[in-house]
Image (cartoon, grey):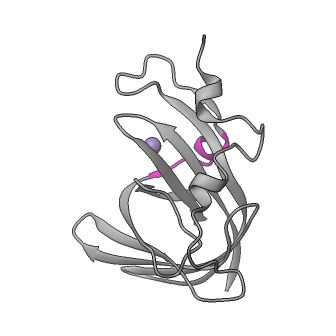
């Protein structure tokens, strides 16, 4: 088990999506999660692996200038400590200590560019809940992504 960090950013690009980033070996291993994480262990969320990002990317909240797709708005939706329990090819299990996400999560590769993100059943799981709807705001600023846009 190794102690690390994670961040989830909500990003308005071609489509609104969540970027899950976990610090591994000095870079942010990253997945785009179209529907975002869930605290319901029965919910399986598609997580598309994307390239590793530099540490600084995980600190960004604002509007990407000149974004060609969507508004480019990004908020830091959640962040905190992450304990990496397992990191095998095609499978990662972590325990997150965020403000919204807590407890165990599993990431499992199911296809070429297709992983599944699922909440582990533990004392933090909340069957039937929808954390993305309940908590749309930035954990840093309290703003929603739409609040970042002019006018
Ligand atoms: Mn993104």
Residue 112 appears at what percent x and percent y?
Answer: 21, 68
- Figure quadrant of residue 22: bottom right
Q: Give how far across and how far down residue 14 sits, in percent.
A: 34, 34
Q: Residue at x 37, y 39 (%)?
A: 15
State whether residue 27 is above or below residue 105: above
- What quarter of the picture does the N terminus occupy? bottom right
Residue 117: quarter of image: bottom left
Q: Quadrant of the C terminus?
A: top right
- Per the image, is 57 magenta? yes
Q: In this rendering, would 149 be left or right of 19?
A: right
* 45 left or right, relative to 96: left
Give the residues drawn in magenta, as a range. Answer: 52-59
Q: Residue at x 29, y 67 (%)?
A: 114
> Which residue sits furthest top?
151
Residue 138 colored in magenta in the image: no
Can you tell me which quadrant of the image ligand 1 is in? top left
The image shows residue 94 at horizontal and vertical percentages of: 60, 78
Residue 101: x and y in percent read 67, 67
* Prevailing secondary structure class for the magenta stretch in the rendered image: helix
Residue at 52 percent across and 81 percent down: it is 41
Is 2 in front, or is 39? 39
Q: How many marks?
A: 0
Vertical position of residue 70 compared to residue 98: above or below? above
């Amino acid at each position: 088990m190794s102690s690390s960090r994670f961040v989830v950013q909500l990003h308005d690009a071609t489509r609104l999506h969540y970027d899950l980033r976990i610090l591994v070996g000095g870079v942010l291993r990253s997945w785009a999660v179209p529907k975002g994480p869930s605290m319901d262990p029965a919910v399986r969320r598609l997580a598309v692996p994307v390239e590793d990002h530099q540490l600084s990317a995980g600190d960004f909240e604002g509007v990407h200038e000149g974004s060609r797709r969507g508004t480019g708005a990004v908020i830091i939706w959640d962040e905190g400590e992450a304990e990496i329990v397992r990191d095998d090819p095609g499978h990662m299990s972590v325990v997150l200590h965020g403000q919204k996400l807590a407890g165990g999560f599993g990431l499992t590769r199911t296809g070429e560019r297709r992983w599944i993100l699922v909440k582990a059943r533990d004392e933090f799981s909340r069957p039937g809940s929808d954390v993305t709807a309940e908590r749309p705001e930035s954990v840093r600023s309290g703003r929603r992504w739409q609040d970042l846009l002019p006018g």
